[in-house]
């Protein structure tokens, strides 16, 4: 007895066809043939499930590709990147240490400088201090010449140290001005002039206009102290030329004073008349009253031939 069974066979368009076949038969009777069903027995059966190759692929977009490349580059360059970060951190630590060290050096230099200023100021206080109620007369006395000299020498050595250790810095130039004035007070006229000349030899912008003007004025005073009147007048003229609006009035008054002291009354009178005309506005400014009184008094005296 032949057993008949039903089988469902897919067609090429995916529709399932139910046929009856006898068990053991290769082809059921009356069933549509493979060709009739439009099927290719050698073809790969297609189903809705994706094959293994499709499952292994990931959807790639621009962001994914860019991120992958960056990660790959970082992994490849990780040693260099880490090394670079280490160098940056080390550099920052060194810079911080240098800044702290420089700050300490500046503070130490400034402290040393002010030690010299204190000694210099104390040396100039030759008069006994004002007595206070209840103070013993022997508590404070005027400095003796030896004590004054000792303080000036201390100031000189201190300024020289600051000037040497901070060469090229603004503090060194300020120390040079104070060192020169200390040398002058110690009677070392030639040493003071050498210091002023060395400072004035520096070119701008290293030597700012204010420091140059101060150095020129100090040099003029040094020449006057040394009895070098023509040189002092020449220095004051340089001061006047540096900035006539700012230094013209005091420079002209000093020039005329030196000319009068040297017996050049006519030149002194001409200098005063010139400055009276050129600095008329400055003479009316607040704070210029002492200059104006001095100028008018001296002009009147020179005009009378006294």
Image (cartoon, rainbow, N blue to C red):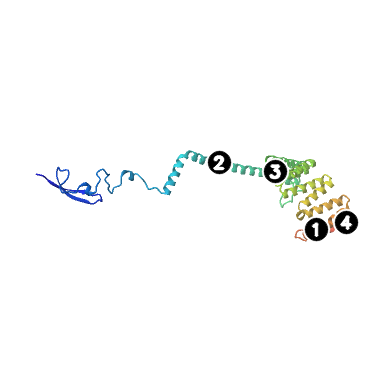
> How far from the left and from the top, in percent, is residue 263?
89, 50
Determine the residue positioned at 44% across, 44% down: 69
Q: Nearer the viewer, mark 2 or mark 3?
A: 2
Left or right side of 248 for 26: left
* Viewer-closest of 184 and 15: 15
* Callout 2: SS: helix
Q: Is residue 10 visible?
A: no
- Disc 4 marks which residue? 302
* Mark 1 surroundings within 10 Å by alpha-carbon count, few (fewer than 14), some (14 through 19), many (20 or more): some
Q: On residue 91, which mark appears?
A: 2
Horizontally, residue 194 falls left or right of residue 81, namely right
Q: Quadrant of residue 177?
A: top right
Q: Earlier in the sequence, mark 1 or mark 4?
A: 1
Q: Give the residue number, with chain letter if any, for mark 1.
A: 278
Distance of mark 1 from mark 4, alpha carbons?
19 Å
Residue at mark 2 to residue at mark 3: CA–CA distance = 30 Å
Which residue: 66% across, 43% down? 109
Look at the image and tell me in which quarter the C terminus lies: bottom right
Could you tell which of marks 1 and 2 lies nearer the N-terminus?
2
- Closest to the observer, 38 or 199: 38
Q: Element under label 4?
A: helix
**Who comes first in sequence, dot 4 or dot 2?**
2
Q: Earlier in the sequence, mark 4 or mark 3?
A: 3
Name the residue that disc number 3 marks: 172
* Lower sequence index among marks 1 and 3: 3
């Amino acid at each position: 007895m032949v057993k008949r069974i039903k089988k469902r066979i897919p067609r090429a368009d995916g529709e399932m066809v139910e046929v009856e076949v006898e068990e053991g038969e290769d082809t059921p009777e009356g069933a549509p043939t493979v060709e009739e069903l439009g099927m290719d027995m050698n073809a790969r059966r297609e189903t809705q499930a994706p094959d293994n190759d499709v499952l292994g692929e990931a959807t790639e977009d621009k962001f994914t590709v860019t991120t992958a490349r960056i990660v790959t580059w970082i992994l490849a360059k990780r040693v260099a990147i880490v090394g670079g970060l280490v160098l940056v951190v080390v550099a920052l630590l060194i810079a911080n240490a240098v800044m702290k060290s420089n700050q300490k050096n500046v503070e130490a230099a400034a402290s040393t400088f002010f030690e010299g200023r204190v000694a210099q100021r104390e040396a100039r206080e030759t008069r006994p201090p004002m007595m206070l109620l209840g103070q013993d007369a022997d508590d404070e006395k005027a400095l003796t010449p030896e004590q004054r000299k000792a303080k000036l020498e201390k100031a000189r050595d201190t300024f020289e140290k600051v000037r040497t250790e901070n060469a090229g810095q603004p503090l060194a130039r300020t120390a040079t001005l104070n060192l020169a004035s200390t040398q002058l007070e110690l009677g070392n006229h030639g040493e003071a002039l050498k210091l002023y000349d060395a400072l004035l030899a520096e070119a701008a912008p290293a030597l700012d206009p204010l420091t140059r003007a101060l150095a020129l004025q100090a040099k003029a005073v040094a020449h006057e102290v040394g009895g070098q009147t023509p040189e002092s007048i020449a220095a004051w003229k340089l001061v006047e030329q540096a900035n006539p609006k700012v230094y013209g009035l005091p420079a002209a008054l000093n020039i005329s004073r030196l000319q009068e002291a040297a017996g050049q009354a006519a030149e002194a009178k001409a200098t005063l008349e010139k400055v009276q005309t050129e600095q008329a506005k400055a003479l009316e400014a607040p704070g210029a009253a002492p200059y104006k009184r001095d100028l008018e008094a001296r002009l009147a005296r020179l005009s009378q031939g006294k």
